[in-house]
Amino acid sequence: MKEIGIGILASVFFAVTFILNRSMELAGGSWMWSASLRFLFMIPFLLIIVLVRRNLKQVLQEIKKHPLQWVTWSFVGFVLFYAPLTYAASYGAGWLVAGTWQMTIVGGILVAPLFYTTIPSQNGPIKKRHRIQTRALLISTIILAGVVLIQWQKASELSPDEILIGILPVLIASFAYPLGNRKMMELCGENLDTFQRVFGMTLSSLPFWILLSLFAIPTVGFPSSGQLLQTFIVAISSGVIATTLFFIATDRVRLNQAKLASVEATQSTQVLFVIAGEAWLLSSPLPNTIAWTGILLIIFGIILHSYRVKMMNRLPREITKPL
């Protein structure tokens, strides 16, 4: 239950991303700066945290052991996650981007067969693929139905091109984020804590953000002071606080695919916070009756996930081991 709460708290800070990214686009800012500046701003804060805790050397040693894997999965988990999100914000409202992003709930469940667990046997350890958690998938489908109802309010106002450009990049991001996160958890194991892993992934993805920044200068010019301030807020709120909280929650349940799926499903609450934030800061209209029905479905889905995790915690330890 604690992990569910941490996941929901992370969603509050994650929601800042969708609201401010849309705000920056409406003010004329470029998605390239919105994406790259967030991670460039994250580096010094994460570096200070790691230095204060005196475990920077350990991070660098782990990266040196598997440099290709670090660069690859950091690119998948951070670059293929955030660049498409900011690009989509250029063409779609925050509620559309945040709503489509909830595909990550299903994405996290569907990537499970790409991972293995080791099972002892008389002939030695055997690797077995994780299976798709069908019950978690069913509950997440209820949440997604709620998301669809929320989007229904404004979907009729969008052209097919706006829907495609606003949705397709987010679908890529929704699968890249859980895949990159889980692959890095698998690679790091117990060797690094959450702060070290977030710093290591940010550091490994840094070359891509620098390249994007260099491309942005001749293409769209330098960012405005307003965009610098807002991306700084996003970097602290979403990049440092939300990412760390979410990674802490997933780390705690990483050995159990069902619980992991439930924690990842808490990200659906971002839609609720984005709707409230856009209504307050950007004067967006409040949800209609259909959308409120969707909100209730999301809350119901989260309650089901929480109840499922609570029941699993009551089972004997040997029964709740990963399948």
Image (cartoon, helix red, strand yellow):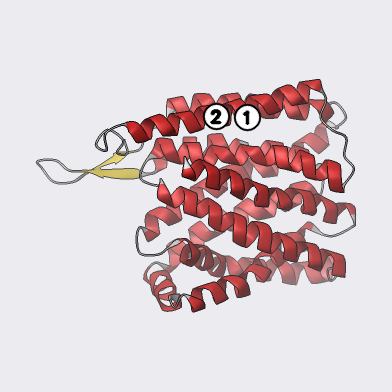
Could you classify mark 1 by the number of other residues whose Cα lies within 10 Å: few (under 14), some (14-19), or many (20 or more)? some
Q: Is residue 76 visible?
A: no
Q: Secondary structure at mark 1?
A: helix
Could you classify mark 2 by the number of other residues whose Cα lies within 10 Å: few (under 14), some (14-19), or many (20 or more)? some
- Which residue in the protein does label 2 denote? 303
The residue under label 2 is which amino acid type? Ile
Q: Are marks 2 and 1 in contact (CB under 8 Å)?
A: yes
Looking at the image, which residue is at 26% across and 34% down? 316
Horizontal placement of 304 versus 61: left or right? right
Q: Is residue 156 visible?
A: yes
The residue under label 1 is which amino acid type? Ile
Looking at the image, which residue is at 83% across and 30% down? 154
Q: Secondary structure at mark 2?
A: helix
Looking at the image, which residue is at 39% across and 66% down? 66
Looking at the image, which residue is at 85% across and 26% down? 156
> What is the x, y in percent for residue 273?
72, 42
Q: Which mark is residue 195?
A: none
Horizontal placement of 117 versus 124: left or right? right
> What is the x, y in percent for residue 81?
62, 51
> What is the x, y in percent for residue 52?
50, 78
Please state, as top left, top right, bottom left or bottom right, where the C terminus lies in the image: top left
> What is the x, y in percent for residue 259?
43, 38
- Which residue in the protein does label 1 denote? 299
